[in-house]
């Protein structure tokens, strides 16, 4: 069995693993305590409030990155589910791109706006696994799309 055939045989299992990881990431993003915002309080005491990725409170303070990351994760999940049943390589590449975008947006939002929580870090690591897998699979995807 040559390398291209092994990769193609492994893809259906990878699509299911991708969908499971994206569901886990989306659940972590939906939870109301996935990000925090720090507000100035009276007498120099900071007020900390926790929010979901999909809460518009972030948007109100100019941080669109969490909302866009959540939308990209949902899009990647939708493409992943479609890919499980239709097995279209181009849809798989789109799923990888959406998951990679979600990872980068979540990381930027976390570190620019200092909104790191344990749940947010775990979600970012989950998306990071998909990002690294996407980076390592773009070469084989491009080779297979040329066939």
Image (cartoon, helix red, strand yellow):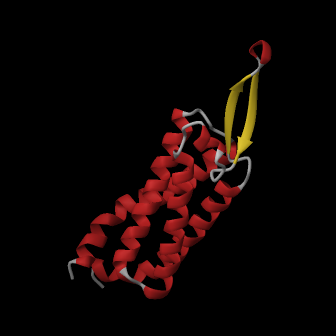
Which residue is depicted at the point 31% across and 83% down? 5
Which residue is depicted at the point 55% across and 65% down? 74
Q: Give above or below for 132 relative to 138.
A: above
Q: Quadrant of residue 135?
A: bottom left
Q: Position of residue 143 (x, y in %)?
A: 23, 73
Q: Position of residue 111 (x, y in %)?
A: 53, 35
Q: Give above or below for 77 relative to 84.
A: above
Q: Give above or below for 107 relative to 79.
A: above
Whether residue 119 sits left or right of residue 75 in the image: it is: right
Q: Position of residue 71 (x, y in %)?
A: 54, 59
Which residue is depicted at the point 50% across and 67% down? 75
In the image, 104 versus 136, the foreground residue is: 104
Q: Give above or below for 134 relative to 16.
A: above
Q: Position of residue 133 (x, y in %)?
A: 43, 61
Q: Residue furthest front?
A: 60
Whether residue 91 sits left or right of residue 103 in the image: it is: left
Q: Quadrant of residue 145?
A: bottom left
Whether residue 132 sits left or right of residue 138 in the image: it is: right
Where the N terminus falls, by quadrant?
A: bottom left
Q: How many marks?
A: 0
In the image, 37 versus 88, the foreground residue is: 37
Which residue is depicted at the point 54% across and 76% down? 16
Q: Residue furthest top?
A: 43
Where the C terminus falls, by quadrant?
A: bottom left
Q: Residue furthest left?
A: 146
């Amino acid at each position: 069995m040559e390398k291209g055939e092994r990769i193609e045989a492994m893809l259906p299992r990878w699509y299911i693993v991708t969908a499971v990881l994206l569901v886990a990431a989306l659940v972590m993003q939906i939870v109301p305590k996935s990000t925090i915002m720090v507000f100035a309080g009276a007498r120099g005491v900071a007020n900390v409030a926790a929010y979901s990725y999909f809460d518009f409170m972030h948007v109100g303070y100019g941080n669109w990155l969490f909302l866009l990351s959540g939308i990209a994760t949902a899009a990647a999940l939708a493409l992943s589910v479609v890919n499980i049943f239709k097995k279209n390589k181009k849809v798989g590449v789109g799923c990888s791109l959406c998951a990679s975008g979600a990872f980068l947006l979540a990381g930027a939002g976390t570190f620019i706006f200092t909104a790191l929580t344990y749940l947010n870090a775990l979600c970012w690591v989950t998306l990071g696994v998909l990002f690294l897998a996407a980076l390592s699979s773009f070469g084989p995807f491009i080779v297979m799309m040329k066939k």
